[in-house]
Image: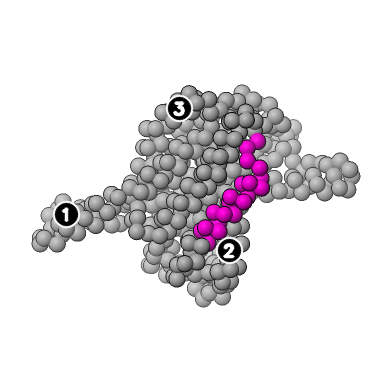
Amino acid sequence: MIYYFFFERLYRSLSGQGEESYFVKALNVFQYVTFRTAYASVTALLISLFFGGRVIRALRKWNVGQQIREEGPQAHLAKKDTPTMGGVLIIGSVLVSTLLWARLSSRYVWIVMIATTLFAVIGFLDDYTKVASKKSLGLTGKQKLAAQLGIAAGVWAALFFMTDYSWNISLPFFKATAQTGITNIGPYLYLPFIALVLIGSSNAVNLTDGLDGLAISVTFVAMATLTGFTYVTGDARFAGYLGLDHRPEVAELTIFCGAMVGASLGFLWYNAPPAEVFMGDVGSLAIGGAIGTIGVLTKQEFILLIVGGVFVIEALSVMMQVSFFKLTKKKYGTGRRLLAMAPLHHHFEIAEKHRWKESKIVFRFLILAILFALLSLSTLKLR
């Protein structure tokens, strides 16, 4: 809306009246993605900071408290009844900021906003079920999976009716896969691929959300990295130089990513140890869904494995734990555990040989997230 008012209406009308004043020339800055991304980030940050305290007080008033897993670390019992569902603050800040600063004629902006909102709705229903039942179990796995599949199918359908969308898979380190279309698998094979990316990304972030400040700090690093990827993908000069699949319509997604960066910092203000509020599934599922959708729209699906390396490790730790338990139970009659507890951050928290403090785990995982971000950015030149 800000872009539309200051550039499309005000600048274009005034610049057409003859000689431009300094004021009119200054309005021209609103057309640049970099300018609008910076201010989208600041706007989302300020919204989060301004409304954060109000949201926390409202959640306390409505008794929206966190339910703790009985088999979880005993130290977490002290967190019981800490306000949860704070993800509404993150998603609300991102959506408002994007609506203010993005060019709303962009179809990709609407796809990512709608997909993120729908993933947030799934998380909201899951959190509400937990709060209402006073248990740590919300929606069943099948219910969440079915809803996530529905969103993935919706994203695919939106892209299917876009004649300019490429069904080519771009592989990191291989320039030819982005430029020649040799990995074009067609729209119908792309449907399960999109489903895998969106569901995997959404659930990976959800599994990472278990310690104060962990998921949101890793999200900040990942989204800052994706901001760079969306910008160079949408810019013809950078895309051509780096051998990327140039997609002009992707440029506006940079504003959404910047808004997510700002919102992450704003939420971290309240979620830093000891957390005053948790994001809940309404936040983690939505953030993961947003990351996956951006990966699909920018043709950087495989890069997400590196950008979100911490999320991937956390998800793999759960898969390995479950698989190992089932295999040993089948073989020995009694299931054994590969880790002291999954996801991995809980293993370092309770394992006898580690017993790391919560803050140490968060900071060390954050360091890993930064390293993964640098590695993913290096793929832009290593082709």
Does the CB distance between marks 3 and 1 fall below 8 Å? Answer: no
In the rendered view, tell whether residue 278 sits above or below residue 8: above
**Residue at which label 3 appears:** 58
Nearer to us: label 2 or label 1: 2
> Between disc 3 and disc 1, whose residue precedes?
1
Neighbours of disc 3 within 10 Å: few (<14), some (14-19), many (20+): few
Name the foreground residue: 175 vs 13: 13
Question: In the rendered structure, does residue 138 fall within the stretch colored magenta?
Answer: yes
Provide the residue span drawn in magenta.
137-156
At 51% across and 44% down in the image, what residue appears? 120
The residue that disc 2 covers is: 191
| Residue 213 visible, this orientation | no
Mark 3: secondary structure: helix
Between the C-alphas of marks 2 and 1, the distance is 47 Å
Q: In terms of image quadrants, where is residue 34?
A: bottom left
Q: Nearer the viewer, mark 3 or mark 1?
A: 3
- Label 1 secondary element: helix
- x and y, in percent, of residue 309 in the image: 59, 51
Query: Is any atom of residue 220 visible in this view?
Result: yes
The amino acid pointed to by label 2 is Leu
Q: Which residue reaches farthest left?
A: 18
The amino acid sitting under disc 1 is: Val
**Within the image, what quadrant is residue 361 found in?**
top right
Q: Is residue 344 left or right of residue 180?
A: right
- Reading the chain from its start, which is encountered first: label 2 or label 1? 1
| Residue 270 colored in magenta in the image | no
Q: Amino acid at mark 3?
A: Ala
The extreme right residue here reads 332
* Neighbourhood count class around disc 2 (C-alpha, 10 Å): few under 14, some 14–19, many 20 upward: some
- Could you say which disc has been placed on residue 24 in the image? 1
The image position of residue 262, as x and y in percent, is: 41, 43
Q: Regarding mark 2 in the picture, which secondary structure is present there?
A: helix
